[in-house]
Each structure stands twice: as structure tokens, then as C-alpha cells.
Amino acid sequence: MTFKVRPCLFAIIALILLFGRSVSAQSIVHRMYLFNPGLIVTVSSGPTVTFTDIKKNSVFPSISPENELGTSYQLTLSWDVFQFLRAGGQLAVANMKGVKPNGNLKFQAQTIEGNFSININPLLLFIPYRTDQLWAPYIILGIGLSYYNSDLMSIAENRTVASRGYGSGSGFLGRVIEGVALGGLGVSYKINENWSVRFETANRWMNSDKFDSFESLNRSPYDFYNLTTFGVSYKIFKPSTYPMVRE
């Protein structure tokens, strides 16, 4: 009798120890700190500003003698890699302008840009994520390709002095193709677990000084432009129910 009971007793003790170890190894997370990764779809739009040789002011855009503000439209698909890191791809379509009154010149361009970027929330590198955090600042870093057509024009004569792309480029639809590096800042406001609104501003640095078909020796050898946008995001995710502590 004793011989038969002991193996069963040992087996029960072993199961209890194994179960206890597995329970202790599990991470129990309160619903306040529960993070649900998912796919984020963002649609946004806003003004564009160029920083080229054909520009009236060094920083701020001018509206006289012609408006230097353009418009961009963006579609972004991104994924939460970690609580503090988001990665994704973006398609941006934009028109851009610049004016050089003392040179009697202006330029205009139409770009189609595809890029890959990451968003880093610096606060979540030091503090834990909470579901009641509504504001989320982030740093934007990325690389991409810009396909563009551009015209350099005489203001007084209203004629084209030089043009790039329009079938003669090596990129998409004969556009000029140029690599770009992205850098900028953004902030989002969470309306609920699915919806949020966001503000972003990011510069795109090109690898040449030919965007406006005008090369200057006394300015930067690289043209760049800025896209500032306001957008709406929708997050698609599967809500997690475990592990967490229910209230």
C-alpha cells in the first residue's frame, strides 16, 4: 500500500511545483499598463515650404510677390514595434514653390515621395506606458525617395527658363529621382483606443542642389523641403485580455 501511494504523492508534488513555477514566471499586468500593438492608418495634409536657392527669405515663406506655400497630402501605414517605437511607410504627394524677386525667378515642383521612417517616443524610454496618457511626443527619422518634376521660370516674362523631369528623368513616369533623409518632430493626441489626431513637421534633405534647377556657390550644396501636416489616425488591433488584473 505504501509502495503504491508514494509514486502518486511524488507525482502530485511535482505537478504542484511545476504549476507554481509557471504561474510565478508569468507577467501579470494591470489593465492600466496593458499595451496593444496594431496597424495604424493615418491620413494627413498641410503646407509645404522649400529651402532652395530660389527663395525670398532664408527661413520663413513669403506670400509676396508670389505665395511660396504649397500643399501636401500623405497616407501612412505604421506598426507599433514596441511601446516607444513605431515603424512604417508613407506615400506623400506635394506641390512646392519658391521665389527669388531680385533675380526675377520663381520655381515650382510636384513631388511623389515614398519613405520608411521610425517614430521614437523619448518619454517612454524612461517612464512606463499608461493607457490614460493622451499626449505622445515623438521624434521622426527615416529615408526615402522623391520623384519630381520642376520648372524654373522668369517672373517678368512668365516663361520657363529650365525644367527637370517631365519624361526625361530616370524615375517613376520619367520624373527625376532623388534620395531623401527625413528628420522631424510630432505629437499625437489619443481620442480613444482606436482614434487619434496628430501634428507633424519633418524636413527632407536631398542629395543634390538641383531641385530648383539653380545651383548657387554661396548657399548650401543640398536642397531640402519641409512638410508640416495635421492628420487623423485609426488603429486596428486585437484587444488583449491576458495577462492583466481585472478591476
Image: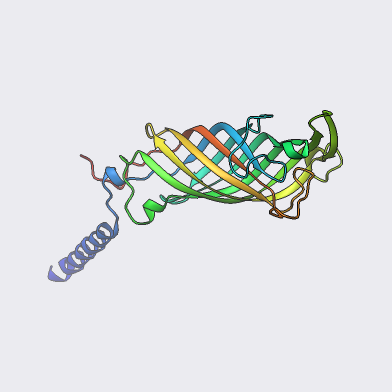
Number of numbered discs visible in the structure rendering: 0
Q: Residue furthest bottom?
A: 3
Left or right: where does residue 26 sit relative to residue 68?
left
Q: Is residue 93 above or below residue 126?
A: above
Left or right: where does residue 124 sit relative to residue 230?
left
Q: Residue at x 65, y 41 (%)?
A: 50
Q: Quadrant of the C terminus?
A: top left
Q: Residue at x 60, y 48 (%)?
A: 116
Where's residue 90, x and y in %?
Answer: 60, 41
Q: Quadrant of the N terminus?
A: bottom left
Q: Is residue 6 above or below residue 230?
A: below
Left or right: where does residue 215 sit relative to residue 83?
right
Q: Nearer the viewer, residue 214 or 163?
A: 214
Instruction: Name which quarter of the figure residue 36 lies in.
Output: top left
Where's residue 107, x and y in %?
Answer: 75, 36
Where's residue 210, x and y in %?
Answer: 77, 48
Q: Nearer the viewer, residue 178 or 192?
A: 178
Instruction: Name which quarter of the figure residue 70 lies in.
Output: top right
Q: Residue at x 81, y 29 (%)?
A: 156
Q: Residue at x 43, y 50 (%)?
A: 121
Q: Residue furthest front?
A: 102
Where's residue 211, x and y in %?
Answer: 75, 45
Instruction: Name which quarter of the figure residue 37 lies in.
Output: top left
Q: Residue furthest left?
A: 2
Q: Nearer the viewer, residue 233 or 45?
A: 45
Q: Is residue 154 above or below residue 23?
A: above
Colouring convention used in this rendered image of the protein: rainbow
Q: Nearer the viewer, residue 158 or 31?
A: 158
